[in-house]
Image: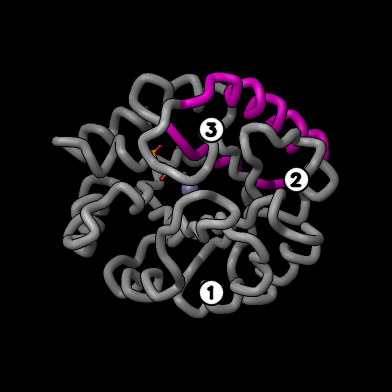
Amino acid sequence: MIKIAPSILAADYLNLAADIRKAESAGADWFHVDIMDGVFVPNISFGPGLVSAIRPVTKKFLDVHLMIVNPEKHLKSFRAAGADNITVHAEAAGSLPEVAAKIKALGATAGVSVNPETPLDKIAGCLKEFELVLVMSVNPGFGGQAFIETSLGKIRELKRLIISTGSKALIEVDGGINEKNAPALKEAGADILVAGSAVFKSADMAQTICKLRF
Ligand code: DX5
Ligand code: ZN
């Protein structure tokens, strides 16, 4: 069954623990934590301190998305803070096989992400090293943007590549996901849907999560 990973970027920061608990009761499978450094992306969000603050609030899988330059420098602190998965950007990391090995040596699963403009060629040679591939369906940096429709073809192509290389990587999609585009994403091969605004700005989180899933 497809997993729904609400992005806390769209949560109420002053009531974050309550919002996380609410999303968990509404059926969230994972929590997605967007880390932005103001360099790789124009915006600044949180650091490892926030990951450790939310770690005791939920037992759910914490999926940390590093939108930062030099991600290798910060793997240890995010893992120590409680990240279960750490995703780096293919555009920001040095050697992808090396960064995957480092993440796994810390005991987390390793993800690699590609921006909308980045071709899959950039990661095709190392799909077996990663447990997760995150396809950005908006330009990273901000929540609440419109879904880029060409992402659907990219997901289908990625699914074929994963199968042909014998990789077991899951496909996660991030940005502009809502009840309308979720069915097409599932059909294209997505395993995990990240949803920020759709979940946290919803009047009925349980119904929204259910609609995203089915
Ligand atoms: C964008 C982030 C996304 C974002 C998704 O840079 O990586 O995770 O929070 O937010 P929505 O679902 O609002 O597009
Ligand atoms: Zn994200």
Q: Where is residue 40 in the image (x, y as percent from the top left)?
A: 60, 53
Relative depth, front residue between 21 and 8:
8
The amino acid type, in three-letter code, at marker 1 is Arg
The amino acid type, in three-letter code, at marker 3 is Ser
Vertical comparison of 80 with 103: above or below: below
Residue matched to label 3 = 137
Q: Horizontally, is 120 left or right of 114 in the view?
A: right
Vertical comparison of 118 with 17: above or below: above
Q: Which mark is residue 167?
A: 2
Residue matched to label 1 = 79
Magenta residues, start to end: 147-176
Q: Horizontally, is 142 left or right of 122 in the view?
A: left
Quadrant location of residue 120?
Answer: top right
What SS does tag 2 mark?
loop
Residue beneath the point at 49% across and 57% down: 36
Outermost residue toward the right? 125
The amino acid type, in three-letter code, at marker 2 is Ser
Whole-angstrom CA distance, mark 2 to mark 3, is: 22 Å
Residue beneath the point at 75% across and 68% down: 101
Position of the C terminus, as image quadrant, is top left
Q: How is the image coloured?
A: one colour
Vertical comparison of 150 with 40: above or below: above
Q: Where is residue 141 in the image (x, y as percent from the top left)?
A: 48, 46
Quadrant location of residue 14?
Answer: bottom left
Which numbered disc, 1 or 2, marks the residue that appears first in the sequence? 1
Which numbered disc, 2 or 3, marks the residue that appears first in the sequence? 3
Q: Position of residue 110 (x, y in %)?
A: 64, 60
